Amino acid sequence: MIVPNFAAIASRYLIQRCHELDNMLKTMNIRPEESGDCEAIFAVHANCFPTTAEARLVDLLRAAGRLCVSLVAEEDGMENNRIIVGHVAFSPVTTEKGAVGIGLAPVAVLAAHRRRGTAAELVRRGLAASQAAGHTWAVVLGEPAYYGRFGFQPAGRYGLSDEYGGGDYFQALELVAGEMPTAGGVVKYAPEFAKFAW
Ligand SMILES: CC(C)(COP(=O)(O)OP(=O)(O)OC[C@H]1O[C@@H](n2cnc3c(N)ncnc32)[C@H](O)[C@@H]1OP(=O)(O)O)[C@@H](O)C(=O)NCCC(=O)NCCS
């Protein structure tokens, strides 16, 4: 007769519950980047994208004073520390007619910390911070299925296009009602973007 090892079963159950509780207790915090965060932000992008282009772009934007909004997501680490697990950057964009908006790029969350709404929170807080800073419209070049949840719509509807031939992947969002430039033509990202072949 096989006797169940209740002690082993109970200990496995307890270990699993501890992991679940540990995850629940981990608090995610979104805040503006601080001077000591640069290396961690670089590491997030370098880990999340195939090359270091996005990581270097963030450094260049910062050095040029064009990182208008830069937010990090941090979580509790193993040693009572806080670790940066995600980052979003916003920099100025300009239409052919000279209207200035804000461009969301890049955003990244470390693989082990995904699908918990961290990027969504970074994007929402970043858009709110952009609006608070006086920006009236935003653009993003990304997956419509993802960015649609924040209210982004294909920018073509507003007569806007991007330099990269993004089509419907180039999306725009009005941050202040009635302030979206119409028939603005091609929207240009900050000059630092041109230093990379996307
Ligand atoms: C995209 C990314 C930032 C999402 O981070 P995250 O914290 O997991 O995002 P959230 O938890 O807010 O949202 C996850 C949801 O978005 C969906 N999603 C993520 N990327 C998506 C994409 N490219 N297209 C469509 N859906 C996407 C997921 O399937 C998931 O869907 P669900 O909510 O229905 O489960 C992360 O996957 C990442 O860093 N990827 C590599 C870098 C990258 O591609 N950045 C975006 C382009 S700049």
Image: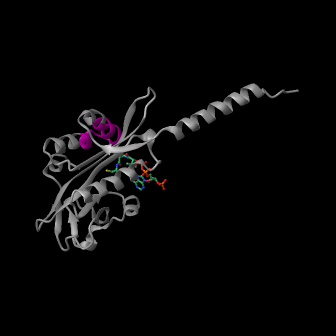
Is residue 122 rendered to the left or right of residue 64? right
Residue name at image x 69 percent, y 28 percent: 11
Q: Nearer the viewer, residue 43 or 29?
A: 29
Is residue 169 rendered to the left or right of residue 66? right
Residue name at image x 13 percent, y 44 percent: 64
Q: Magenta segment, principal secondary structure?
A: helix
Residue 191 forms part of the magenta stretch: no
Q: Is residue 55 above or below residue 143?
A: above
Q: Position of residue 185 (x, y in %)?
A: 17, 69
Q: Quadrant of residue 2?
A: top right
Q: Quadrant of residue 184?
A: bottom left
Q: Position of residue 124 (x, y in %)?
A: 36, 56
Q: Position of residue 148 (x, y in %)?
A: 38, 63
Q: Is residue 63 above or below residue 175?
A: above
- Residue extending furthest toward the front: 132
Q: Quadrant of residue 7?
A: top right
Residue name at image x 20 percent, y 50 percent: 68
Magenta residues, start to end: 41-55
Q: Nearer the viewer, residue 107 or 122?
A: 122
Is residue 151 rendered to the left or right of residue 117? left
Is residue 54 rendered to the left or right of residue 65? right
Residue name at image x 28 percent, y 58 percent: 140
Residue 53 forms part of the magenta stretch: yes
Look at the image and tell me in which quarter the N terminus lies: top right
Q: Nearer the viewer, residue 173 or 2?
A: 173
Q: Is residue 66 above or below residue 17?
A: below
